[in-house]
Amino acid sequence: MENKNSRREFIRTTALGAAALSIGGLAMSAKSYGRVVGANERINVAIIGLGRRLGAYLDPISNKANNVNLLYLCDVMESQMQNAAKRFSKVIDYQPRLEGDFFKVIADNELDAIFNATPDHWHAPGTWLANQAGKHVYLEKPCTHNPYEGEMLLKAEKRFGKVIQIGNQQRSADESIEIISQIHNGIIGKAYLAKAFYSNNRGRVVNPQSAPVPQGLNWEMWQGPAPRKPYMHDTWDYNWHWYGWHYGTAETGNNALHEFDIARWALQVNHPEKVIVDADKYHWKDDGWTMYDTMDATLKYPGGKTIKWDGKSRNNHSTYGAGRGTIIYGTEGSVWIDRGGYKLYDRAGKFVKENLLKNQVDGTLLGGGGDSTPQHAKNFFEKIRGKEELRSPVSEGVTSTLMCHLSNIAYRTGEVLECDPQTGRITNSKNAMKLWQREYEKGWEPNF
């Protein structure tokens, strides 16, 4: 089913924008609005995108203590909506509405917030469109497809006054909060270096070929803001990550963001001064994977601080003792941290203490492992109600996501990038700045 008519209607009815929220004709602050959401502060939510992240939402939405009502399950693939309805039927005692049209969902005045779990190219546009319609957004990583969209998300937050929580769920893990606070208080002296890493054993990827649109898939809606292309076999279901830059952000956008965010949080840095990347595709040279599958990136920051990324998508050697995580080095010690907790060592390398989850989960599993989504989603709900501050606000998410984009741009141009540490913008290459933003399908450009 085409989405063009509903998109045009949405754009027409929101053309004037909404600088302030209005209820009964009275302007209200976002905090005041949050306090009167639904009956008894109940928050009506929708999940947009019902793929691999679906399981992470079962607990926070079904938990009665969160006082949330699942109003919609929305996806471009009919079978995914049916599957999601079946899974939720086991944990809630009511039936959410199934709706394949994103614009119809966000146009519903009963709806308060969405979980945006769409592909990368939909993340930022889907969020600012939902904000424009008066909805709060829990936005999965990466929060943008390109650096320009980060600037637009910050503008949308300011323009529409809605809550945007970025899905860097480790920011809500008690163990991470505990040790990062201690790092900031000097437990390892001055933190100067972070090594973020990811290793996986992804195999051969199908070579995309022209094919009929799969039954039940709304290909027009799936493409959303991206310029139109004919359907290619196996694109819509995860492999869009590896089929060029039209939809995805490669493994760095897909997974490095989590560890980059922890590294930046620990080192208390914002934008780098220089980005140096060595990356290539080393495995299955003839398959459909068009990007690098291995990356070594170095980001240099003011004050002599450095963040390094060791990403190996198709070589599962456990270089650092786990599939993913971050090591923080300081003048008086070091910390090994991942989704399962942390281990602290002194400068001599002697073990000091640890705080680990009892049940360790593989963090490289599709859909996420060692998940703190229940706490992170609860924080999102409580921010809407005006009772907590966000663990991962859009300003933090955009800054961490830009690390991924700069690494990708350095790879794509083959250049060492010099950046303005105040804004993150590239200062030494017009060629690299051409990749700062994308071309949009006509009618999908931001209109606020």
Image (cartoon, rainbow, N blue to C red):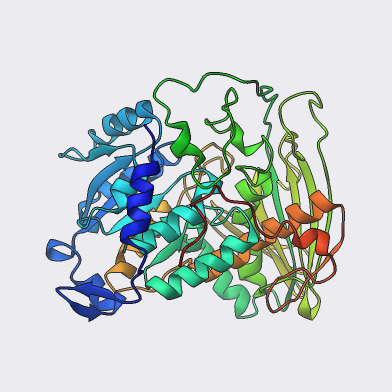
As displayed, is residue 221 above or below residue 401? above
Location of residue 251 by image quarter: top right
| Viewer-side residue, 61 vs 12 | 12
x and y, in percent, of residue 294 in the image: 78, 42
Which residue sits at x=25%, y=50%? 63
Please state if 400 lies on the left or on the right of 7 as rendered. right
| Viewer-side residue, 29 vs 283 | 29
Q: Can residue 261 be seen in this view?
A: no
Which residue sits at x=77%, y=40%? 292
x and y, in percent, of residue 12 in the image: 34, 58
Q: In which quadrant of the rendered image does the C terminus lie? A: bottom left
Which residue sits at x=55%, y=64%? 397
Q: In which quadrant of the rendered image does the N terminus lie? A: top left
Which residue sits at x=44%, y=38%? 221
| Viewer-side residue, 26 vs 276 | 26
x and y, in percent, of residue 15 in the image: 37, 64
As displayed, is residue 310 above or below residue 77? below
Location of residue 244 by image quarter: top right
Please state if 91 lies on the left or on the right of 228 as rendered. left
Q: Can residue 276 be seen in this view?
A: yes
